[in-house]
Amino acid sequence: MNKIDRSGSKISHRIIEELRERILTGKFPNDSKLPAERELAEEFGVSQPTIREAIRALDAMGLLDVRHGSGTYVNHNRMFMVATALQALLQLDAVTLAQALDVRRILGGHSVALAAEIATEADIRRIESSLQMLETLDDIDSIEAVVRRMVDFQVVISEASRNPLLSMIEKLLIVLLLEVQMRALRHRGVAYWKSRSLRFQSDRKRIVEAMTRRDRAEATRAMEGYFQHQLEEFLRDPELVKMCFSDEEVINAVSEILVNLRRNGGTVAE
């Protein structure tokens, strides 16, 4: 028995911490079914509603997945957990999209440098394929499809860095920056988004060519040029330059993105 000390902090908080520790240390493995509420209530010496409160909190954190009619399962949705923490930081500090793009530039330069050296041949083929998908956009007719291809190109390079923490943070920024812009500029139509994507295609080609030669320095320079051109276009756009993560419209967009991350298990390029 593991009776919870009822003194001090709220009992449910102590149960949350105990269950969280079991999940993070692997005592409750990913995808495993959590013991029944009654069983946990007996173990901790508390009521089932107290256990239910703890489960709801862990579900909100992205550590559990409550499946009605089936039970509660451990769910290591790392992307969602990082996203919720980053969302609070971006909003509380009123970070602008331009500032977020600057951080993305720093991370992207490092990840492409790593990828140029250690990417596998399979990684390079994926990157070349994603580049080819952006070469012509005549086969798609939705803004979402255009943005999805833009996201995918950046994500596959990040993943080729083989640094899971770097890639997770970078992928999250990629999605936030592009999808927030997509929602804000949807009224410009699919033709605008196709034209915008194609304006950066020469930069993308330089990046991929350098990576295929395993030229770390040139890949880094090419990526820097890619981001510089993005930033210049960003700062010229009167709608984008003033956007901030504390704006109501942006808050709503980020909330939608988080819902999608939660729904699809943390996958960013859907």
Image: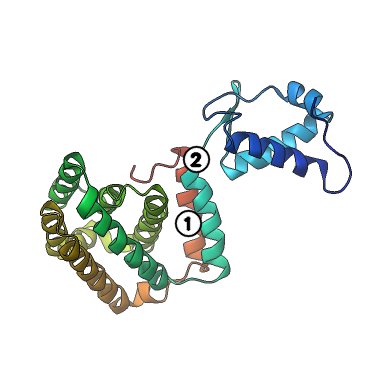
Which secondary structure lies at badge 2?
Answer: loop
The answer to whether residue 259 is visible is no
Residue 153 is situated, as x and y percent measured from the top left of the image, at: 24, 51
Q: Nearer the viewer, mark 1 or mark 2?
A: 2
Quadrant (top left/top right/bottom left/bottom right) for the C terminus: top left
- Classify mark 2: residues with Cα within 10 Å, few (<14), some (14-19) or many (20+): many
Q: Considering the numbered disc 1 on the image, is that residue within a helix, a strand or a loop?
A: helix
**Quick check: 260 above or below 66?**
below
Instruction: Residue at 32% x, 66% y: name it.
Output: 105
Closer to the camera in the image, 194 or 211: 211
Front residue of 194/226: it is 226
Depicted 42 relative to depicted 167: above or below: above
Outermost right residue = 7
In the picture, measured across the screen, residue 254 lies left or right of residue 70, that is left
Residue 50 picture location, percent across and down? 79, 35
Identity, as a three-letter code, of the amino acid under mark 2:
Asn
The quadrant in which the N terminus is found is top right
Q: Is residue 48 visible?
A: yes
- The image quadrant of residue 55 is top right
- Furthest residue toward front: 117
Q: Earlier in the sequence, mark 1 or mark 2?
A: 2
**What kind of residue is marked 1?**
Val
Residue with the mark numbered 2: 77
Marks 1 and 2 sit apart, C-alpha to C-alpha, by 17 Å
The residue at the point 61 percent across, 29 percent down is 27
Which mark, residue 9?
none
Q: Where 193 falls versus 26 (above or below)?
A: below
How far across and how far down the image is residue 119, in percent? 22, 47
Residue 254 is tagged as 1
